[in-house]
Image (tube, rainbow, N blue to C red):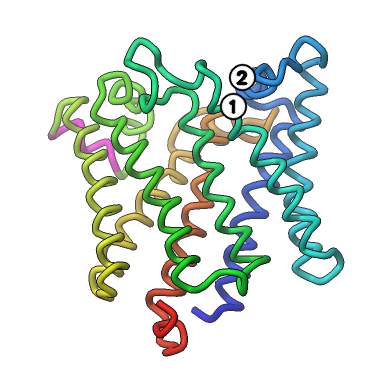
Amino acid sequence: MSYAQTKNSVTLLLTFSFAVLGITFLLGANPRALTATFGFYELTDMLSASTLSVLAGVGMLSVTITTLAARIGVLPAIVPVSITLITVAVPLLTLLSPTRWMADLGGFPIIGSGQGIIKYFAVLPLVAFLFFKDKFTAKQHTFMNYASVAMVLFWIGGMKFYEFEANGIVGLVETSPFMSWLYDVFTVQQASNVIGGFDILFAILLGIGIFIRNKPLLVISGLACLSVFVMTQTFMFSVPGTFNGDTLVNGLGHFVIKDLWFIANLIIVAHYTLSNDSAYQAKL
């Protein structure tokens, strides 16, 4: 995939996901997430729920609009970069709140509601690729995007070995036409262990493939990691109630659509590691 094709793919995934998030927030979706986020800044007592929804929605949509505008040369890159960093920083800083961690299980790194928050880290290397490509080497772009993928697969994958997480994904797995068979073969906990083990194993193998520059390993592990994030998108259609006429998607929809960012991360990794362009390979 050429640089132009990669850039267009990343732009599409980034802007589409933020557009969906923005529209659904404007429609009043996921009020619990808004309360948890803006409550950290003590804004929930100052502003109404509808106002908070508008703030979140406008912020998300601004990322989409300014990114597209910058891509066609209407705005300087600093505008979407600044807006995106602010929009991403707002939820990420709430990781400092003890409410994001499960104190009864020891707190950090046992994450609770912050599972959806850590996904915002994936946006940072995407912005770097779109607007600061020449500020970083091919190796640095590869590492940053791999790190985002590895972080979420290690972290959320590791949670699968805990009973609370195993029980928490039952509604996703049992309704999935691709994964429900796991419960015919394994117990709830065993199935969760298999899923978590898959996530962690192929995140490790992808890192090894990048380090030793082994294309077959890169392809196999990259596709395996990609399958994780593609699979989560199917939950939008298999889990009842994810789509609705009032807010477009619900909280689950918000959670899984962020995985489009990791697909974009993997596209960038593939661009730099699997390209036949000798210049890319020399830089790695």
Q: Residue at x 32, y 67 (%)?
A: 210
Q: Amino acid at mark 2?
A: Ala
Q: Residue at x 37, y 50 (%)?
A: 150
Q: Which residues are magenta?
A: 179-185
Q: Is residue 1 above or below residue 61?
A: below
Residue 182 lies in the magenta stretch: yes
Cβ–Cβ under 8 Å for marks 1 and 2: yes
Q: Amino acid at mark 1?
A: Thr
Q: Nearer the viewer, mark 1 or mark 2?
A: 1
- Cα distance, mark 1 to mark 2? 8 Å
Q: Which residue is mark 1?
A: 94
The total of numbered circles placed on residues is 2
Please tell me which residue lies in front, 262 or 283: 283
Q: Earlier in the sequence, mark 1 or mark 2?
A: 2
Disc sitting over residue 69 in the figure = none
Numbered disc 2: secondary structure: helix
Q: Which residue is mark 2?
A: 36
Q: Residue 272's image quarter?
A: bottom left
